[in-house]
Amino acid sequence: MKSTTFTSSLPEELLDLLDSYAGKFNVPKNRILEKALRVYFERMKKAEYIHSFRRAAGDGNMLSMAEEGLEDYLKILDEK
């Protein structure tokens, strides 16, 4: 994966923690930031799914389609 350099500012306390943990575990700071961002974005994706399912749960049309699909699935299981 291609890397790109960027400039940003962070609170001093976060930079101090970053320096501390990078030194403690002998890991480059950019690797810590990359991992933290990946974990954060994965959590955001899960939150989006949860939000969409909750929104769909309140939609009568979506509930009907889901129930119809479940009926079809149960018929398939009975045939086996």
Image (cartoon, rainbow, N blue to C red):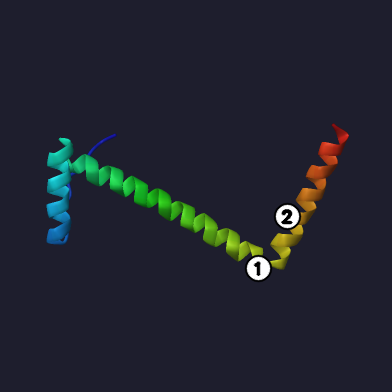
Query: Quick check: 74 above or below 60?
Result: above
The location of residue 3, given as percent across then percent down, is 23, 39
Residue under label 1: 58
Query: At label 2, which amino acid type do we have?
Result: Ala
Whether residue 39 sits left or right of residue 29 in the image: it is right
The location of residue 14, given as percent across then percent down, is 17, 56
Whether residue 58 sits left or right of residue 2 in the image: it is right
Residue 26 seen in the current view: yes
Say which of 8 and 31 sits in front: 31
Query: At label 1, which amino acid type do we have?
Result: Gly
Residue at 53% from the left image edge and 62% from the top image edge:
51
Mark 1 and mark 2 residues within 8 Å of each other at the beta carbon: no
Please tell me in which quadrant of the rendered image residue 13 appears.
bottom left
Residue at 56% from the left image edge and 60% from the top image edge:
52
Dot 1 or dot 2, earlier in sequence: 1
Q: Secondary structure at mark 2?
A: helix
Mark 1 to mark 2: distance in Å?
12 Å
Badge 1, how many Cα within 10 Å: few under 14, some, many 20+?
few
Whether residue 50 sits left or right of residue 26 in the image: it is right
Q: Residue furthest front?
A: 24
Query: Quick check: 64 above or below 70?
Result: below
The location of residue 61, given as percent across then percent down, is 72, 64
Residue under label 2: 66
Location of the C terminus by quadrant is top right
